[in-house]
Image: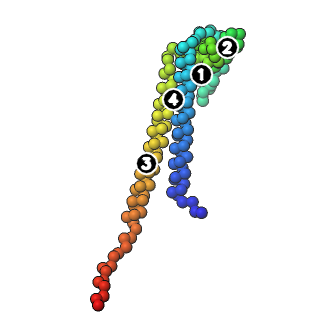
Amino acid sequence: MRIRPLHVLHSLVTVVVLVQMGFAAAFLVDAATTDATYDALAAHHVVVGGHIVGCLPLRGVRGAVAVSLCRDDYRYRSVLYSDVIPLGETTSFVVDPRHPADRMDVAAFAKGPEETTGDLVFAGVLLASALMMVVVHLEHLRQRRRRSELRRPVPSRAPRSSPPSR
């Protein structure tokens, strides 16, 4: 079987659209998870203070410190929890008493569920670009079909001779 360039194009478009749809689904799931965590914390929450255990400076390309990440520990109901925060962030966390593993930084909690806006925008852009890719591909196929029909020779019709008379 001969692989034609059109088959490669169909496969490439299919793979790209499926990858875009997969990433869009991942962003939507992340937004839904963040919303669910925020809703649970908004309904029942306790503010717990933590303390910084240590920091690690991450250097950029030219050796300058780009960001310092710190490990922040806090205890809730005699269980130790850890999180990594940028240097200078607040060390307090909002914890759900029913599910202590559900937590959020106080600064992020105060902003509300706006962190999901970026996820929703990315998901929308990915879905729109997948749709546009399908539309452009189908339009390309339609124009290609039309061009090939115009190139086909039209069978000439010879005038019919009248049937022989008797």
Circle 1 or circle 3, nearest the eye = 3
Residue 30 at what x, y percent from top left?
56, 28
Please tell me which of labels 1 and 2 falls first in the chain.
1
Disc 1 residue crowd, few under 14, some 14–19, many 20+, Cα 10 Å: few
Q: Which mark is residue 136?
A: 3
Residue 137 at what x, y percent from top left?
45, 50
Q: Secondary structure at mark 1?
A: strand
Q: Is residue 47 above or below residue 158?
A: above
Please tell me which of labels 3 and 2 falls first in the chain.
2
Q: Secondary structure at mark 2?
A: strand
For label 2, the residue is 73
Q: CA distance from mark 4 to mark 3?
A: 26 Å
Side of 62 relative to 139 (left or right): right
Q: Which mark is residue 119?
A: 4
Which corner quadrant of the image does residue 65 belong to? Answer: top right
Write the residue at 56% across / 33% down.
26
Side of 1 relative to 54 (left or right): left
Please tell me which of labels 4 and 2 falls first in the chain.
2
